Image (tube, rainbow, N blue to C red):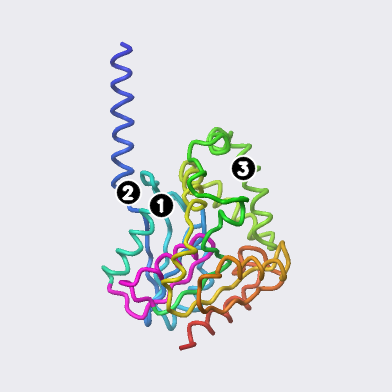
Amino acid sequence: MKNIISLCFAIVLFSSIQAQENNPPIHVEVTGSGVPILLIPGFTVPGESWNETVKHLAKDYECHVVTLAGFGGKAPIAFPWLPKVNKALQDYILEKELQNLTVIGHSLGGTIAIWLASRENLKLSKIILVDALPAAGALMFPNYNPDNLAYESPFNNQQLAMSENDFNQLAAGMSQGMSLNVKAQEQIKNWIIEADRKTYVYGYTDYLKLDLREDLKKITIPVTILAADKPFGKEMVTKNYIDQYANLEDYDLIIAENSAHFIMFDQPEWFLEQIKSCLASK
């Protein structure tokens, strides 16, 4: 009987792994017509975070809105997660033959935009980075070394083992620091809770291990960075961005005042104005 149970468990486990191998790393919805824009959301966040932005841009642009595997109700994929996401986005741009493409990325989405911009074969037009860094882990850990960040760590194991109630409390606390907008905080909390737990835990480790500071040297297209001033203040934020982007030859850094991480929710009118201005510039 034990052998039969073990065999059944092995079959179920194998089937689950095979299903994840076949799941797509990205899901893209296309709205509008005109010059193409690829919009990549942040970690745990589905493409719908761009809804208000797309509503205003789709009249003049073809908006390709991305949701990453494991988030927004999309099926998870086998690990490693982030390298597969990056490759899928690169393949999508090439397969769709997107010309004169602008990539707009928030947080992790902006980090991915940096990676895409460093791929010479994609020939992007410009990138707009929304509160995004080339090496988020370097800002969080002293003496940062990506190789020292382990997937099987006590912290990761603790998050995987969290009860639903404990994880909900964690999500609520995190969301309060990501936006000044109370309604948006609730939505962000729900997105975190709805995320596939393993993707949330191991995917975030992928994110922290990614260091693109050397890749910045390869970027020759226009780069605009919109950075939130909360919670650290304009002076410290400016210093952090200058340090992180030291290898990027030229870029525009614009600070969003009275805004936390989700600038599009905290300063929506200002945000749209900046995006439209960047898109219109040569």
Q: Is residue 220 left or right of residue 42?
A: left
Q: Earlier in the sequence, mark 3 or mark 2?
A: 2
Disc 3 crowd rating (10 Å Cα; few below 14, some 14-19, many 20+) is some
Badge 2 amino acid: Asn
Q: Quadrant of residue 165?
A: top right
Q: Secondary structure at mark 3?
A: helix
Query: Which residue appears farthest toward the top when viewing the image?
Result: 1
- Nearer to us: label 3 or label 1: 1
Mark 3–mark 2 distance (CA, rounded to whole Å): 27 Å
- Residue 121 inside the magenta-drawn segment: yes
Q: Is residue 171 magenta?
A: no
The residue that appears at 46% across and 69% down in the rendered structure is 216
Three-letter amino acid code of the residue under disc 3: Asn
Identify the residue position indicated by label 1 in the image: 69
Note whether 230 is above or below 75 in the view shown. Answer: below
Quadrant showing the N terminus: top left
Going by the picture, which residue comes out furthest to the front?
A: 143
Q: Residue 54 at what x, y percent from top left?
A: 48, 73
Q: Secondary structure at mark 1?
A: loop
Disc 3, disc 1: CB below 8 Å? no
Residue in view at x 70 percent, y 62 percent: 180
Magenta segment: 97-124
| Amino acid at dot 1 | Ala
Q: Are marks 1 and 2 in contact (CB under 8 Å)?
A: yes
Give the CA separation, mark 1 to mark 2. Answer: 8 Å
Can you identify the residue that label 3 sits on? 168
- Dot 1 or dot 2, earlier in sequence: 2
**Circle 2 sits on which residue?**
23
- Work out how far the residue at label 3 is from the one at label 1, CA to CA, in angstroms: 21 Å
